[in-house]
Image (cartoon, rainbow, N blue to C red):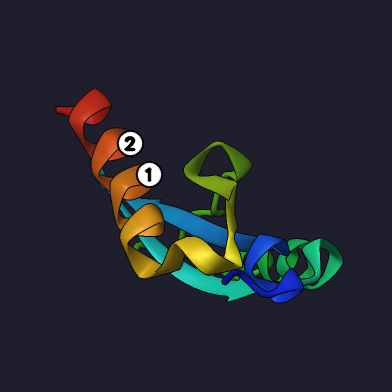
Amino acid sequence: MRTPKADKPYFTLCIREGATWSPEFGDFDRETVEGERADWLDHYTDAGKRRRKADTMIITTRYGSGQADIDRWVADLNSRAA
């Protein structure tokens, strides 16, 4: 039996470094995830360049779907980049 929490949206910030996407931060509150993205964008890369919003994506999954759903999203993003 599924609990109400299982259908709750879960937001994950994905970051692209080079050609590879990876999940970096997740929360049930989208504003919290957007705040993490803003913090990430405020910092410079190791090469001293500004980070770009185009290198971020917030994906939405359902809590009950687990990590496997996030992994599928990231694999799909990486397959498009290849």
Q: Are marks 1 and 2 in contact (CB under 8 Å)?
A: yes
Viewer-proximal residue among 38 and 2: 2
* Residue type, numbered disc 2: Leu
Viewer-proximal residue among 8 and 12: 8
78 lies above or below 40: above
- The residue sitting at 85% across, 65% down in the picture is 31
* SS state under label 2: helix
Viewer-proximal residue among 64 and 81: 64
Viewer-proximal residue among 20 and 27: 27
Percent position of residue 55, x then y = 48, 44
Q: Quadrant of the N terminus?
A: bottom right
Give me the C-alpha separation between circle 1 and circle 2: 6 Å
Tell whether 35 sits left or right of 80: right
Look at mark 1 in the image and give the residue it sits on. Answer: 73
Quadrant in the picture for residue 79: top left
Q: Point out the residue furthest to the right here.
A: 31
Tell whether 80 sits left or right of 40: left
Tell whether 18 sits left or right of 29: left
* Residue type, numbered disc 1: Trp
- The residue sitting at 80% across, 70% down in the picture is 29
Percent position of residue 51, x then y = 54, 53
Depth check, mark 1 against mark 2: the one in front is: 1
- The residue sitting at 59% across, 58% down in the picture is 62
Look at mark 2 in the image and give the residue it sits on. Answer: 77
Percent position of residue 75, x then y = 24, 44
38 lies above or below 79: below
